[in-house]
Image: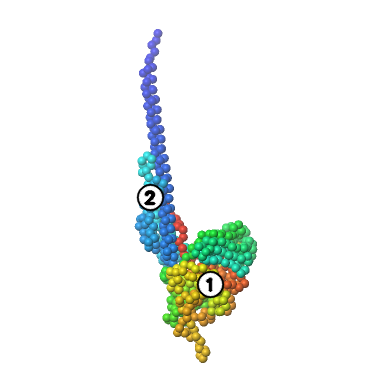
Amino acid sequence: MRHRPSQAGIVLPVVVAIILVVATLAWGVFNYVLYGTRAAGVYITLTQCRLAAQTGLERNKYDVGQAFKRYYRAFPSMWDSLSWFSTWTAHSIGTSGYVCTVMSNGQVNGCTVTVTVTGVTRTSSASALKYARVTFQTTATKTSPSGIAVSKTIEEVVEYALWRSPVFNYAYFVNNYGWFQGGGVTANGEIRSNGDMSLDGSSYVNGLIYASVNAEVGATGKVISTAKYQTCAQYWSGAGTRARPTNPPSSTAGVKWDLGYDYATTASNAQYPYQDILPMPYLGDLTVYITMASDLSSTIKQNGVVLVNGHFSGTGPSGLAAGVDKGCIVLDGTSKPIVIDGPVVIDGDVIIKGTISGQGTIYSGRNIHIVGDITYSSAPSWPKPDTTPDTTLQSNASKDMVGLIAKGNIVLGNYTNATWLSSEKSYITTPFVKAYACDPSDASIGYPSTFPGNYTASDTGQKIVYTYNKTTKVWSVSSTPADRKYYESAVGDKIVGDYAQSAAITRIDAVLYNNHAVMGTVGACAFNGALISRDEAIIYSGSVTFNWDIRLGSASPDGKSFFIALPMVPADPRVISCREVL
């Protein structure tokens, strides 16, 4: 017999070794899972912090923008409204009782969020484009499920800018009752009313029609229209080169003009009744515009001679240093063009006609009286169809554009002619004109807090009176001025009548804007630019056409860099840069 060795001493160590290996692996897996769970919890918490930080930032960006808009609505005439941003701390921004509190230790989706303002920069007063850039830094913190503190910090630079009011996106915009009546009215561009809009079947609107609900004037926001519109082919053949281009510009070219005439959109739905009111900013205190004119070295020249150096407050046409027409001016471009460079301010009335050139705006402290045709020396042109839209865009950038902006009224034609008032009276008095609230700054030119609606009434001001000596056959200024109506000028009737052209007005190249009314008589007339007014009372003969200048459009390539200092409003906030700090 042979003896076999025992196996018991080997099995036990092997089993123990296996158990240790399995335990080690299990422990490793447990720790791996535990680490992964913790890491996942931290990652999820980090994502929550990132979203919470962005949410808090968006809330405060919006709150700052709304507070600035409230301030601007309270002081709409301030060119330098961005001074609101000049006072700021880490957790507040704004001035003059319109301070916006910025979030500190707020709760967003379970995260603690703090938003701080770390810097504000503004453009200089001489800058054409006005903006303030606010740097926000937002930190969100939260403890992960495993007890680890997590945070995320985001920084954004946000631009709050002033840009021309969207009312200039329309060929025709009125703050009261809009009407195309009498046959032969054409609008090549969108039209809008902060009230009802009524158009007869002889009208053409090559664009969209908007009406708004407005309790102040009793408007329900209806569009009452049988107006027609043209196909692209009809528009190309009949609209002329002063009308806005189409989108697309030709049958083969791609999309170019976002605000061009879009036949397809117009054909599908041309009418937009019951819209919200689109606020029309008031032209208020002109002091800030005077400062702007000085900063930009703006002028009006004629034949190389400076007529206005930024601001005119001097002796009026009567020649009397202290006459009631002080600060009024006559601009006659019949023989030599009137050259406008930048925004200028005229304290009183402006009497104007003839050829104008340049890019700029005339701000009048009262009325602007257009007593004859106004024509651009170098007018923009949009061929139809257009196979080279880029060339057209570049060419038009340097062409003339002039704004005529009045705190009072824009008066068309020769109001000293007896037939002028007989044609106008029904449309510049109640009940056609509804009562409305006025800007307090217009009290200086005779407007009460609520204007009752009669432009033929006395505005408590005076006008120069000229008398004729039959013996000497000489006109002279009377020592006693006469009462003045809202539609009249402080300049004497004789001067207005002498400068008024005998024929009816047939062309006005300008952007027209005023606090109160555009009124008067014209012939078969083309308005090339835009007409923006509270009340509209234009009496025409034959036909009238409103050709919108697409360079006014903030959303078109033509308008993005075009600046003539028209009344502005706050633009929507725009993110300049964004980064994660931690």
Amino acid type at circle 2 is Gly
Q: Nearer the viewer, residue 161 or 431?
A: 431
Residue 178 badge: none
Q: Quadrant of the N terminus?
A: top left
Give residue 535's position: percent from left, percent from top. 52, 69
- Residue located at (45% from left, 57% from top): 573
Amino acid type at circle 1 is Ile
- Residue located at (61% from left, 73% from top): 541
From the viewer's perspective, is the residue at label 1 or at label 2 nearer? Answer: 1
- Residue located at (53% from left, 63% from top): 219
Q: Which residue is label 1 attached to? A: 428
Q: Quadrant of residue 550?
A: bottom right
Q: Residues within 10 Å of mark 2 (few under 14, many from 20)?
A: some
- Residue located at (37% from left, 54% from top): 116
Mark 1 or mark 2: which comes first in sequence?
2
- Circle 1 — which element? loop
Compared to 490, does 398 lie above or below? above
Compared to 28, does 119 lie above or below? below
Q: Which residue is label 2 attached to? A: 106
- Circle 2 — which element? strand
Query: Number of marks in the image?
Result: 2
Outermost residue, bottom side: 471
Q: Nearer the viewer, residue 466 or 134?
A: 466
Colour scheme of the picture? rainbow
Q: Is residue 392 visible?
A: no
Q: CA distance from mark 1 to mark 2?
A: 55 Å
Give residue 555's position: percent from left, percent from top. 52, 60
Q: Residues within 10 Å of mark 1 (few under 14, many from 20)?
A: many
Q: Is residue 63 visible?
A: yes
Q: Are the two marked residues, 1 and 2, in contact with CB atoms closer than 8 angstroms? A: no
Give residue 513's position: percent from left, percent from top. 50, 69
